[in-house]
Image (tube, helix red, strand yellow):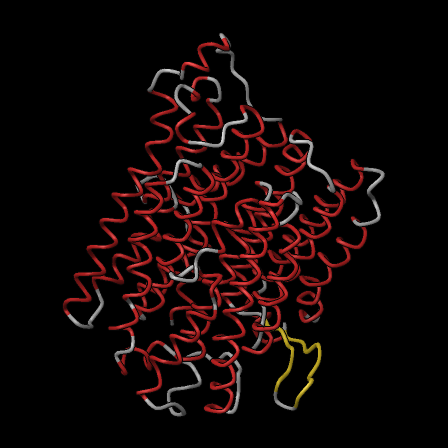
Amino acid sequence: MDLSYILMLTLAVPVVGSLIISQLGKTPNLREAVTLITAGLLFAVNVYLFLHQEQASIEAVFTLAEPIEGLAISFSFNTLGILFALIASGLWIATSIYAIGYMRAHKEGYQTRFFTLFAVAIAGVMAVAYSDNLFTLFIFYEFLTISTYPLVTHAGTSEAKRGGRKYILILMGSSILFFLPAMIITWFSAGTLDFVQGGILANNLSSTAVIPLLILFILGISKAGVMPLHRWLPSAMVAPTPVSALLHAVAVVKAGVFSIVKVIVFIFGTDFITDTHANDWLIWLPTLTILFASLIALTKDNLKERLAYSTVSQLSYIVLGALLANQMAIIGASMHIAMHAFAKIALFFAAGAILVTMHKKNVSELSGMGKRMPFTFAVFTIGTLSIIGLPFFGGMWSKWYLLSGALNYEGISATYWLVLSVLTISSMLNIYYLLSIPVKAFFTSPSEDELAENDTSIKEAPIACLIGMAIPTVMTLYLFFDPSVFYTLSEAISK
């Protein structure tokens, strides 16, 4: 079978699924069954491409249109793309299961619209993952922003609308002001926007122009959450928890860091960046974001806001790894796309379960809650330990390679020590602002309000939520013992 047709299915399956889901508002059980089937089929298609990746790297390519000669909307199989696609499509299954329990238990309105737009957004993620050139990436990067806006504002409240405005203005504004000009400069400099191993700018761009152009890309791809263009992400936490979990812990934010890694590796080329010493100066952007976002997270009592700023910090680990531009760091950055996704989605799922079951939003309200929701807080603990990077959890490996990349960095000595110091300090802050939550839940006495309720019975979220929570949690544990799939793909990206 020509694998170009299989590649087409990665776009077609969620689009067709969304059309069917949109017609099933009167039969919610069937609507949700179609959602799960669609998610399962998409994951199966991506697994098939992964298993046939040698053949797919040659055959799996197709062009949707060519509006201007030399600027095609085209897609192709690539190792970074399949890594991102496997994560997003696999976690769509877990999120769909979780969302069924959450949306019903929370009595959310417009559930058919929710599941329809979710499928549309996943189609956008697949298009970003398999984009063959910068022009295609830009188009579907913007499509992802537009398609997720209604999900962010799903509740329809003034708070949701206000958060949605900030979401759309920052993401689209930064794209128009920075990403679009960066792409145009690249086109006129290199005469192409194709992603090429080793980059396309080495012989086509002055060394003095590397830093300004790379700054335009980093600021323009604001889904990566690099400060100061990070405020859209905490604002988007007004969305229902399944949206926060997949789209703002996995799909949208990972589309940002995925795009930055792809630009650095396949547009600039790591050798060109290190030869021009551009990374000696630009490394300050993600390192300061890592540190400041961690410090801000310490101050947030709202659980989802604390997780949002944790995400801002963790995304810059990936940007930092890409800018270190050596093999170990690129492996670490690529693996962190996966390891952070599984751990952080588990944390968001747990936060949603707490809201649905106990109606608690703030960390200060969680004293003694571990005894009433032991499964939920066990999930939260495992996700936290992986984010910190401790042994027996998948997050250890991405942190291992990121630190190895920092140790192999050959730039300015002061920058070298800055990177190592910030990575160490950030991990310590992770312990404080994340691990303190399950510690509070398991080892402190219940609040006075909780005691007044005189109810200490175990009460967990609906079974669908628990199943959805279990999937990424089990994967977080499994990936410590066998990270080979993501390591192999990450190693291929770094060559």
Of 314 and 494, which appears nearest the observer? 314
Residue toward you, 214 or 176: 176
Which one is nearer the viewer's eye here, 18 or 437? 437
- The residue lying furthest to the front in this view is 158
> Is residue 321 shown left or right of residue 467?
left
Q: Position of residue 137 (x, y in %)?
A: 57, 72
Name the residue at 58% across, 29% down. 356
* Residue 112 spot, x, y in % from top left: 76, 44
Whether residue 280 sits left or right of residue 104 in the image: it is: left
Instruction: Classify the position of the N terminus by image quarter.
Output: bottom right
Q: Residue 490, located in which quarter of the rendered image?
A: bottom left
Q: Measuring from the top left, give residue 102's x and y in whole percent.
A: 63, 34
For the point 67% across and 61% down, the residue is 10
Judge whether 99 appears above or below 76 on screen.
Answer: above
Q: Nearer the viewer, residue 281 or 2?
A: 281
Residue at horizontal 41 percent and vertical 70 percent from the top: 218
Using the image, determine if residue 23 lies above or below residue 216.
above
